[in-house]
Structure formats: structure tokens, C-alpha cells
Image (cartoon, rainbow, N blue to C red):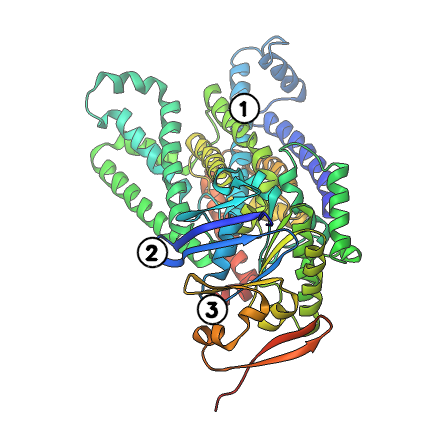
Amino acid sequence: MVIPLVHATGVAFAYDGEVPALRGVDFDLATEELVCILGPNGAGKSTLLKVLGGILAPDEGTVEVEGARLAGLTPRVRAQRIAFVPQALAALPDVTVGDFVAFGRYAHQGAFRRPTEADRSAVQRALAEADITNLAARPLVELSGGQRQRALVARALAQETQVLLVDEPTTALDPAHQVSVMELLDKLRAQGRAVAVVTHDLNLASQFATRLVVLDDGRKVADGSTDEVLREEVLEPIYGPSLRYEIWSSSTGPRPVVLPWRQA
Amino acid sequence: MKVRRSGRVAVGLALALIVLSGLSLLRGELSEFTTAEMLQGLGATLGMADPLPNLRQGIFSLLVRQTLVAAGAGAALAYSGALLQGVFRNGLASPSILGITAGASVGATVVILLIGGHGGNADWLEAAAKHSPILVTAGSFVGAMTIALMVALIGGGAGRVSVPTLLLVGIAVNACLNGVLTAITAWLVENDWMISQAVFHWSFGSLDSKSWSQVALVWGAVALAASAYPLIGRELDLFAGGEEDAEGLGVHTRRVKLIVLAAASLAAASAVAVVGQIAFIGLIVPHVMRSLTGSSHRSLLPLVLLAGAVFLLGSDVFQRWVFGREKFRPGVVMSLLGGPFFLGLLIARRREVRTW
């Protein structure tokens, strides 16, 4: 049995202590997994990702990373183990891509320490992995949506963590960039990282996920392979009738395809 | 490019500070000194030369303290503004606009009232009156800190503090505090003319007639607040993407916010306690420096300390050299300058303002 890197049990969370977003969710994430977290708007997907990343503290339940309780770790140690890739960022004036990726080294640096050789090479590696080495000197605000997403991933890579939590990486991108960002995440998974991705895109999930988790109204309603989850019996109770289910062939064999489809 | 420029800007500011200090020591409101006298007086202040004859050394010493207080208070207020703008991720934050300065005023006024004979006839109050500068500072610090925490609670929460929220909270807080201040001064004018004069005098701000203990207070607070720099400089840069983002990168956001608010309040409170209400330095100086050297707090915070010192000392020196006697109190001058600057800032950002 694969021991999960991230192990969450019975996680509950309510915003302002009132509006429940998660009502007891179990979630595991192992190395070389790319788990897509699916579910309708307001299902609690991003909240779950933030709880797994230690950005939000759960009201109930526990999250463990590499066997250690997340709640007992300092932010610095936590950020050495888990990197969180947010959906979008506030505009950062006069920050270059290189500086921005170097922000990911914060957890590895002391208060007075200047960037070391290890920091510099980690930033270079991260830029190369995300294929944006040529953009390092450009101001962040000048990047296109796809480039910006890569910069966000590169910053997380500079944290040198085994766990990557990625919040809606493809939402703002054109179709070609959606695929290339998912290919990047798949490459990182294949290198041995544990990747969890929140997404609305059932078909990207179908092609890239090693496992799918579906949330609805703060509860986990499905957890399994793409073939098990992307089926009418599973999805119709959640998304309603306006979806059409197909099986298409692909380079990796037959894949389930789910399309939004006009009803009337 | 801007990073390399910050070195040159720092050198320029340091030189300006030295020149301004020299000019400040050559001409006070009532007295002038030659360069030779100035050097001898400085030597005597440091215990390395004979004092100037007659009362001249005493007068010169007042000028030394005025120079130190102006530079220190300017540095403190500008630094405080830069910290608040960083932690609220909002260029319109400053100690005066958020009401922290007014909070300090209420705290100081209450202390002046108490030790001025309106706190009953307790012996300890009479004894305490001997330490009035310290107590007034303590009172204004408590007032400033209370307001800083209140503003953080009301406007805070997890996300970015929106501009309208910040401004509205500031307006409301200032309105409440000004109400209290007006009530106190109105009552005092009727009932205790002497104390009302003390409150008035204090509230307009002054840079002259300062004691060494007040110099030490301002500079001690500046040193303490500045010593937080290694704990918050880089962290504030990471705050730019939002608090959750900073937390994800490993920043202890709650601790950083607390340190920043404490340092900003300490700096603002000590400055206000010693020189009175001098508004807008905390707004203007960080803005000017950011446009010169970029928004990275690692270079911005040290530069703002220097620039704040140059700014307040410079305006004091300008006044003394151009007008001779003090025509306006520094607080009045800053309000005259700062109001239009604030308005200009809003107009310059009007495209953004319309989308609020």
C-alpha cells in the first residue's frame, strides 16, 4: 500500500464559524498522483485545498503531511513541505518574473541571510521546469495568462516541496494553454511529486488525473479512477441533466468525455 | 534598475540630512551662530570642547535638540506610514488617515487632563506630573495602539483591505476621536484655560523647546521600530500578493501583522507624543520614495527613515531660514501641504477611484 504524503481525516471548516464549506472530508494524496478535485461552484473545492495547504485551519479533523500534524508545524516548515499555487494574484508592480519565483525561497531563508547558491540554482531549476527561463527579467505584469500561470507554478517549484496544491490553473486560459499547463503538472507528477488540482474542467481531468475526487456541498461524494467517476450515475445527481457522456479514444486509450449539452 | 538607484538615493538623502542639520544649527528662531560657534557648540555637546560663553551654549543646545527631534519625528512618521501601507496593501494608508494620530492625541490629552489637576487630588498624580513627557508619550502610545488594533479588526479579515473600507473606517474613527477631542477642549476652554492652552499647544505640534528625554524618546522609538526590519522587510513584499498567498509561502502572517502594527504605532505614537499632531508625512514620504526606488520594502523601509528625517527637518529649516521666526506650527504647515497632496493622489488615481 502506498503511504500518502498528505492524509486528511474528517476535515470540517466554516467561514466566519458560520457558513459551512466542508462537512467532514477525508482526503489522501500520494507521490506520483495527480488528483483532480471536482465539484460544482460552492462545493468546497478551493476551501479543501487551502485546508490541505495549511492556509486555513480546519474547525474539525486533522491534516497530516509526511506523517506530521500540519497544525503543529510553523508556517516556514509547512511551506518547505507543501506549495500552494493560487488561482490568480493581485497585480504586483515592478516585480520581475525572476524576483517573483525567488519569493518561493522564503521558507528556506533566515531573517538576515542573503540568497545562497542553493537558492539561486533552485530558482533557475524552477524557471527551467516551467519553461520560462527566457522570461526571468520581464516584469510580471507584462505576462500573458498562460505565462503568468507558469510563473505561479515556478514559484511553487522553487519551494522544493513534494506536495503541490494547484487552484484552478486553467480557468483563465485559452484551450491550447490549458493543455500545456496540465502537461506541465503531469510532468511534475511523473517526477515523483504529489499534485492536487482543483478544476472545473472534467475533460482535462479525464486526460490528466490519476484519480478524481468529487465534492458536493462540503462532502466528498466520489473518489476513484476517471472511468469510475466520469459517469452519468455519479455526476448527474451533482451537476444535473445538462451533460452528455461519451467515450473517445486517445493516445492513452479510451477516455470518458463529458460535455455541457443543450437540453431544449 | 530601480534597485541600483536606491543606493544613489540613499547617499543623496544622507548628504541632504547632513547639510540640513548644519543649516538647522546655524540659525534658530531667535538666534544665529557662526560656523565656528556651531563646531565649538557641537564639541561641547559631546563633551569634547569648552562650552560657548554666556547663555549661548544653552541656546545652542536647544537647537541641537530641535534638530534631533525634527529628524527623528519625521523618520518615525514616514516609517510608520510605509509600514501601514505595506501591511494594508494600500497606498492611501497612513497614521493620520487611519486615525492613529488622532488616537494618540486623545491618549495624550487625557493624560494632560489627569496630571493637570483633573484626575482628583491623588498624591500619585501629583508625583506623576514630574514625569509628564514620559506619561504623555505613554498615553498617546496606548491611544495609537488601541486605534491601530481597532482599524485592523474592522478593516482586516483575511483578504485585501479595500480602499473604500479603509477610507470609511478612517473617516469614522477620526470623526469619533475628533468628537471626543472637541468635547474635551470645549469643556476646558470654559473651565480650565491653562490646561486648554497646554492641549492646544500640544495639538498643533512643535519642534522647539524639547528636553533631552524627549529626544531620547523619539529616537528610542525609531530605533526599536526600525529593529523590526529583519522580521518584516521581506515579509511585507510577500504580502503584496495577499495574506493567504504569503501564508502559503511560509510567512507567519499573524505575527508579521502584529509586529508591523506595533512598530507603526510605536513610531507614530512617540513622534506624536513629542511633537504633537503632524499629519501627512506618513502618506507623502513613502509615496515619493516608492516612485523613486520601487516598492520593495527591503529598500523602501530604510530609505523612508532617511527621507522622513530630511522632509520634516527640511521644512523646519526652510521655515526658519525664510521666515526667521516661526510663523506656523509644523502641524499646521503639514496640514496645508498634506491636504492638497492627498487630493492630488486621489485625482491621479481617479481611473481606479471610479471603479471603487
Residue assigned mark 2: A18
Residue B281 appears anywhere in the view: no
Residue A122 appears anywhere in the view: yes
Camera-side residue of B49 and B301: B301
Q: Which residue is depicted at the point 23% across and 16% down?
A: B123
Circle 3 crowding by C-alpha within 10 Å: few under 14, some 14–19, many from 20: few
In the rendering, which numbered label is found on residue A44? Answer: none
**Where residue B310 appears, x then y in whole percent?**
60, 36
Work out whether B55 lies above or below A157: above
Q: Is residue B343 left or right of residue B304?
A: left
Q: Chain of mark 3?
A: A
Q: Which image quadrant for residue B193?
A: top left
Q: Give the Cα separation between the discs numbered 2 and 1.
A: 60 Å
- Could you say whether the residue bearing mark 3 is in a helix, strand or loop? loop
**Where residue B118 appears, x then y in whole percent?**
22, 28
Q: Which image quadrant for residue B306?
A: top right
Q: Is residue B183 left or right of residue A8?
A: left
- The amino acid type of the residue labelled 1 equals Leu
Circle 2 crowding by C-alpha within 10 Å: few under 14, some 14–19, many from 20: few
- The amino acid type of the residue labelled 2 equals Glu
Residue assigned mark 1: B63
Q: Nearer the viewer, mark 2 or mark 1?
A: 2
**Where residue A220 appears, x then y in whole percent?**
45, 61
Q: Give the Cα separation between the discs numbered 1 and 3.
A: 67 Å
Q: Which residue is depicted at the point 60% across and 51% down?
A: A30
In the rendering, which numbered label is found on residue A41? Answer: 3
- The amino acid type of the residue labelled 3 equals Asn
